[in-house]
Image: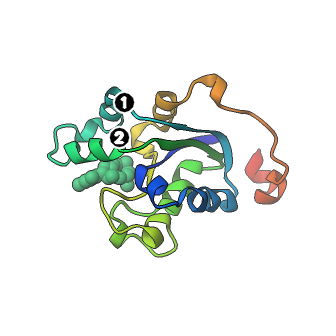
C-alpha cells in the first residue's frame, strides 16, 4: 500500500497542535506505519528543501525548521500521497481551504504546520531520508475492512 511522509513542523509543537494534527490523519483512516520526534540537521534540511536552497527565504526556513524538534510520521493507505495532501491543504495557510489543517489552523506561507510529500518529489526517497527500515512497522489494523471495500484492497 502507498506510504507518504508527514512532518509536524516546529509551529505545530509550539502551538500545541501535535495531537490535533495526528488526530485528523487518524480519523481519516490512514494507518501510522512509523512515528518519532527528531531534530533536523543542516544536511537533512538542505536535502529536504533542495529546490529552495538558493532562495532568499531559505535562511528563514532553515532557522524555523531547526528551532525545535519535529514529529516525523509515515502514513499508509490507498492513494495515501494525494489523500494526505488534501487534508493538509495548499501551502499558504491564509489561502488554504477551510477544513484542511492549514486552512483551519495556519496563517503563514512558511510556518504552515506540516510538511507533506509531493508525488513529483519521490515520497519514498523522503521516507528513506528520515526513517530506517526497523523504524517502520507492518501490522494489521483491525478497522481496515471498514475503511476500505474489498475491491480497493485487491
Ligand atoms: O509544503 P508544500 O509542499 O505545500 O510547499 P513547497 O512549495 O514544497 O514548499 C516547502 C515549504 O517551503 C513550504 O511548506 C514552506 O514552509 C516553505 N516555503 C517558504 O517558506 N516560502 C516560499 N515562498 C515557499 C515555500
Ligand atoms: Mg512540497
The kind of secondary structure element at disc 2 is loop
Q: How many marks?
A: 2
Q: Is residue 104 above or below residue 89?
A: below
User: Is residue 16 left or right of 65 when viewed as pictured?
Assistant: right
The kind of secondary structure element at disc 1 is loop
> Mark 2 vs mark 1: which is more N-terminal?
1
Nearer-the-camera pick, 66 or 140: 66
Q: Is the CB of the residue bearing disc 2 within 8 angstroms of ligand 1?
A: no
The quarter holding residue 66 reads top left
Rendered residue at 48%/38% (across/down): 123
Quadrant into which the N terminus falls: top right
Nearer-the-camera pick, 71 or 131: 71
Instruction: Name the residue that disc number 2 marks.
Output: 66
How far is the residue under mark 2 from the one under mark 1?
7 Å
Give x and y (percent) for residue 70. Answer: 47, 43
Rendered residue at 47%/76% (across/down): 98
Q: What mark, if any, has residue 154 been given in the picture? A: none
Q: Is residue 47 above or below residue 7?
A: above
Q: Is the CB of the residue bearing disc 1 within 8 angstroms of ligand 1?
A: no
Rendered residue at 33%/26% (across/down): 43
Give x and y (percent) for residue 74. Answer: 59, 41
Q: Is residue 130 above or below residue 90?
A: above
Q: Residues within 10 Å of mark 2 (few under 14, many from 20)?
A: some
Instruction: Name the residue that disc number 1 marks.
Output: 41
The quarter holding residue 76 reads top right
Give x and y (percent) for residue 10. Answer: 42, 50
Rendered residue at 48%/60% (across/down): 88
Q: Residues within 10 Å of mark 1 (few under 14, many from 20)?
A: few
Give x and y (percent) for residue 93. Answer: 36, 66
CB atoms of marks 2 and 1 within 8 Å: yes
Amino acid at each position: 500500500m502507498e506510504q507518504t511522509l508527514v512532518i509536524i513542523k516546529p509551529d505545530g509543537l509550539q502551538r500545541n497542535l501535535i495531537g490535533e494534527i495526528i488526530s485528523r490523519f487518524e480519523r481519516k483512516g490512514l494507518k501510522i506505519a512509523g512515528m518519532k520526534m527528531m531534530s533536523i540537521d543542516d544536511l537533512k534540511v538542505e536535502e529536504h528543501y533542495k529546490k529552495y536552497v538558493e532562495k532568499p527565504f531559505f535562511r528563514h526556513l532553515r532557522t524555523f525548521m531547526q528551532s525545535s524538534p519535529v514529529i516525523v510520521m509515515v502514513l499508509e493507505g490507498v492513494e495515501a500521497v494525494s489523500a494526505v495532501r488534501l487534508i493538509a491543504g495548499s501551502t499558504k495557510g491564509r489561502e488554504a481551504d477551510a477544513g484542511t489543517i492549514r486552512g483551519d489552523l495556519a496563517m503563514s506561507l512558511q510556518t504552515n504546520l506540516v510538511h507533506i510529500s509531493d508525488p513529483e518529489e519521490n515520497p519514498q526517497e523522503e521516507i528513506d531520508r528520515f526513517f530506517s527500515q526497523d523504524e517502520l512497522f507492518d501490522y494489521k489494523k483491525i478497522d481496515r475492512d471498514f475503511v476500505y471495500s474489498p475491491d480497493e484492497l485487491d
